Image: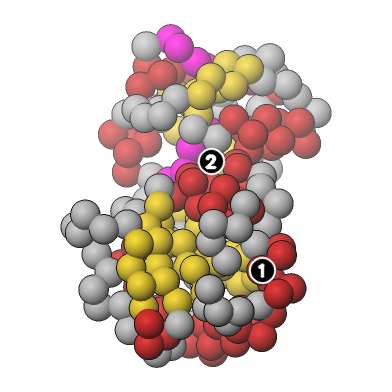
Amino acid sequence: MARNFLTIALPKGKLLTDSLEVLTKIGIECQEVSEESRKLVFPLEKAQAQIIICRPTDIPTFVEYGAADVGFVGKDTLLEENKDVVELLDLGFGYCRFVVAMPEEKVSPRLPDGKFDLSELNHQRVATKFPRVAEEFFRKQGMQVLPIKLHGNIELAPRVGLSEMIVDIVSTGTTLRQNKLVEVAPILEATTRLIANRVAYRMKYERINELTEKLRQIL
C-alpha cells in the first residue's frame, strides 16, 4: 500500500454522521460510506484513503496496533481504553460529561460551598461502563471504590441495590432525572478526538499532519 495512503477508523453510531461531515468539508468525498451498508471497509481511491467502520470502544485498539493510521474517537473511550496512541486534535463534536450520580433520597445536604460531601462514598460500589475513569477520579479524592462494570442500564443499578452510585456520561441530564438520580460531582468533559498510530505518525507524518491541519482550520 502506498506510503501516503491513509486508513481512517470511524465510530459506528451517533458520532459517524458528524465524522463524515467534517471529512467531507475538508474534501474527502465519502458519500458512499454508510452504517446501513453491509460493508465495513470503504476504499476512497480519489482521496488515497480508506474508511473502516468500528465499534467506538474498538477504535483505540485498531489504531494502537496499526490496523488504522488514524481514528475519530470520544475522549471518554480514549481515557477508559488507555491505549498507546497519539492524540492530535479535539474535533469538538460529540460533547458529553462524566459525572457521579446517586439516588436523590440518599444524597446528603450540600456543603456551604455548594458541593456535595463525597466522603460517604468511600469504599462503596459504583456501577459504570468506565471503571478506569471512576477509579482514577476517586483515587484523586483520596478514596477507594469498588467498580461494577455494566454495559447498559447503568441508572438501574442504584435503584435495585446493585451499587450506591454510578459514574456515567451525560449530555442533558434528562436520563438521570427520569431515574431519580442526582449528579453529586462532575468528573470531566469529553468530545471527539483525532488520534493516530505512533508508527504511522512518523512514517506518514506529512499526510497525517495535512489531515490534522485541514480539520483544525474548519473547526
Tell me the amino acid under the disc marked 1.
Ala
Tell me the amino acid under the disc marked 2.
Val
The answer to which quarter of the image holds residue 145 is top right
Q: Is residue 176 above or below residue 58?
A: above
The structure residue drawn at horizontal position 59% and vertical position 30%, both measured from the top left corner, is 131
The structure residue drawn at horizontal position 71% and vertical position 74%, both measured from the top left corner, is 203
- The secondary element bearing badge 2 is classed as strand
The structure residue drawn at horizontal position 69% and vertical position 79%, both measured from the top left corner, is 205
In the image: residue 166, left or right of residue 213: left
Residue 127 at x, y percent in the picture: 50, 23
Residue 86 at x, y percent in the picture: 69, 63
The residue stretch that appears in magenta? 161-171
Q: Residue furthest right?
A: 142
- Would you name the residue on which mark 2 appears? 99
In the image: residue 128, left or right of residue 196: left
Few, some or many residues within 10 Å of mark 2 (<14, 14–19, 20+): many
Front-lying residue, 104 or 63: 63
